[in-house]
């Protein structure tokens, strides 16, 4: 096998497949490597926003996902600590669909990987664990596993929250102020499920939340997410079971439900407010490896797909115009920072402190329950269709 490529992508989840697919479609030879054998499970809320679908559509991968008949979502329900409930459809936004999906990551990631490896310029290798970076001067020119070495002009780390690529470059997010933790399980025979996602701001979980995301008419992904900036991650399991037992809405839905065996799992969330570069010369980090997780909702899918798209743009500009690969990181930083950092990540980081106050949360959700536009704005922000600053408009 040829072991020299234009780009090596380490990690074949959504960010890695996005980067590999966009890059290969531009005509470059891509090696896509993952330590796992697909299909494999991945802890997630399984929600795909309209913004995520827009990226998949640009990639021409949306049709593949839609053929799998994912559960369509067009509404958001939110509850406050004092029990106030708000339900609304997010407002229409030009260029975005009026719905999203919920589809288990085990299914989506496998579908997306099949799409990526179906592109002629993509070479996939599974069960390969990268352990070293190979240098040519200051640039990284390859990666090495136990038995094999692969060489490339540009390296992309898409290997998740425990990214080896980020660790080797001292770029990994291990700061508890910019991390979260989540625990979820799948349930069968869930009652009263609709085409909506539910977000529950329980007082004991603030500024995190619990969720109920239906994956079909009778099955759901149910979980709890907290921020380690405010809460001890060791208490996540207790919070999960407390939500199931004490939340009235959850109890009604789950009275005859069963937790699917071995589906209760937790994961770390590398939050996007982490103040660091996401590149080193000719190495780019995307998705969870780059801490591209929403600071308010914990959503990572859109950022994974979009950062992969940005990486492809940076690669194309670099190779086609100058071939000075050490410049690709600078181009990539400019691209992602223009959209993500100040507008979304830092605004969300500030909102975390407000959400830690139950009185403010009760006030905000109560206000939204009485005003249709406020309810739609709240739904739009949670569904990733509107920017977070919209929550402060016309207060």
Image (cartoon, rainbow, N blue to C red):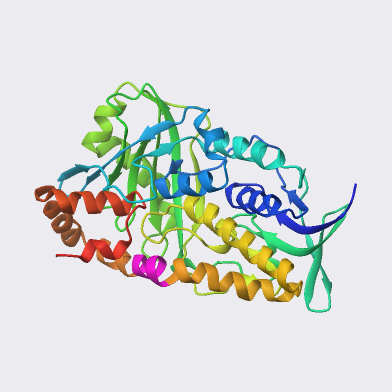
Q: Quadrant of the C terminus?
A: bottom left
- Horizontal side of 276 relative to 353 (left or right) equals right
Lateral position of residue 52 relative to residue 190, left or right: right
For image coordinates 17% across by 54% down, the residue present is 374
Q: Is residue 354 above or below residue 26?
A: below
- Give the percent coordinates (x, y) of residue 369: 13, 48
**Res. 273 in view:** no
Q: Please tell me in which quadrant of the rendered image residue 220 appears.
A: top left
Query: In the image shown, does 47 or 386 lie closer to the viewer?
Result: 386
Residue sitting farthest toward the bottom: 137
What residue do we see at 16% from left, 55% from top?
Answer: 362
Residue 242: % across, % down: 31, 41
| Number of marks present in the image shown | 0
Is residue 313 in the magenta section? Answer: no
- Quadrant in the rendering for residue 158: bottom right
Q: Is 120 drawn above or below residue 290 in the view shown?
A: above
Q: Does residue 11 lie above or below 350 as drawn? A: above
Where does residue 292 sit, x and y in percent of width and height? 51, 60
Residue 199 is left or right of residue 54, and the answer is left
Counting from the top left corner in percent of width and height, residue 321 is at 71, 71
Q: Main secondary structure of the magenta part?
A: helix
Q: Nearer the viewer, residue 144 or 315?
A: 315
Task: Tell me the magenta residue range.
Answer: 342-349
Please tell me whether residue 217 is drawn above or below residue 364 in the rendered image.
above
- Residue sitting at the far left: 370
Task: Tell me if residue 221 can be seen.
Answer: yes
Q: Residue at x 74, y 74 (%)?
A: 322
Residue at 50% across, 74% down: 275
């Amino acid at each position: 096998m040829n072991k020299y490529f234009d780009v090596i992508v380490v990690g074949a989840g959504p960010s890695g497949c996005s980067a590999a697919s966009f890059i290969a479609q531009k005509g470059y030879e891509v090696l896509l490597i993952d330590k796992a054998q697909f299909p494999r499970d991945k802890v997630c809320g399984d929600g795909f926003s309209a913004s995520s679908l827009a990226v998949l559509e640009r990639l021409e991968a949306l049709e593949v996902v839609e053929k799998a008949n994912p559960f369509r979502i067009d509404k958001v329900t939110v509850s406050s600590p004092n029990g106030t409930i708000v339900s609304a459809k997010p407002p229409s936004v030009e260029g975005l669909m009026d719905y999203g999906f919920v589809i288990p990551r085990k299914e989506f990631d496998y579908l997306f990987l099949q799409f990526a490896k179906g592109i002629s310029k993509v070479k996939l290798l599974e069960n390969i664990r990268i352990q070293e970076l190979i240098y040519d001067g200051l640039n990284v020119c390859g990666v090495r596993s136990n038995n094999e070495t692969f060489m490339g002009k540009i390296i992309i780390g898409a290997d998740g929250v425990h990214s080896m690529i980020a660790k080797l470059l001292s770029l990994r997010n291990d700061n508890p102020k910019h991390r979260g933790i989540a625990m979820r399980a799948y349930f069968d025979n869930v009652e009263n499920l609709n085409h909506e996602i539910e977000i529950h701001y329980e007082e004991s979980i603030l500024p995190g939340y619990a969720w109920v995301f239906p994956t079909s008419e009778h099955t759901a992904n149910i979980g709890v997410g907290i921020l380690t900036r405010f809460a001890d991650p060791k208490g996540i399991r207790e919070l999960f079971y407390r939500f199931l037992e004490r939340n009235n809405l959850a109890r009604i839905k789950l009275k005859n439900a069963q937790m699917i065996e071995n589906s209760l799992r937790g994961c770390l969330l590398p939050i996007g407010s982490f103040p660091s570069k996401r590149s080193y010369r000719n190495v780019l980090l995307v998705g969870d490896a780059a801490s591209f997780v929403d600071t308010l909702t914990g959503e990572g899918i859109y950022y994974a797909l979009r950062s992969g798209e940005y990486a492809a743009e940076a690669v194309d500009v670099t190779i086609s115009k100058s071939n000075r690969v050490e410049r690709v990181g600078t181009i990539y930083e400019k691209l992602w920072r223009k959209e993500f950092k100040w507008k979304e990540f830092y605004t969300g980081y500030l909102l975390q402190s407000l959400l830690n106050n139950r009185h403010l949360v009760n006030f905000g959700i109560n206000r939204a329950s009485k005003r249709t536009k406020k309810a739609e704005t709240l739904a739009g922000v949670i569904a990733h269709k509107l920017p977070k600053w919209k929550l402060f408009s016309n207060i």
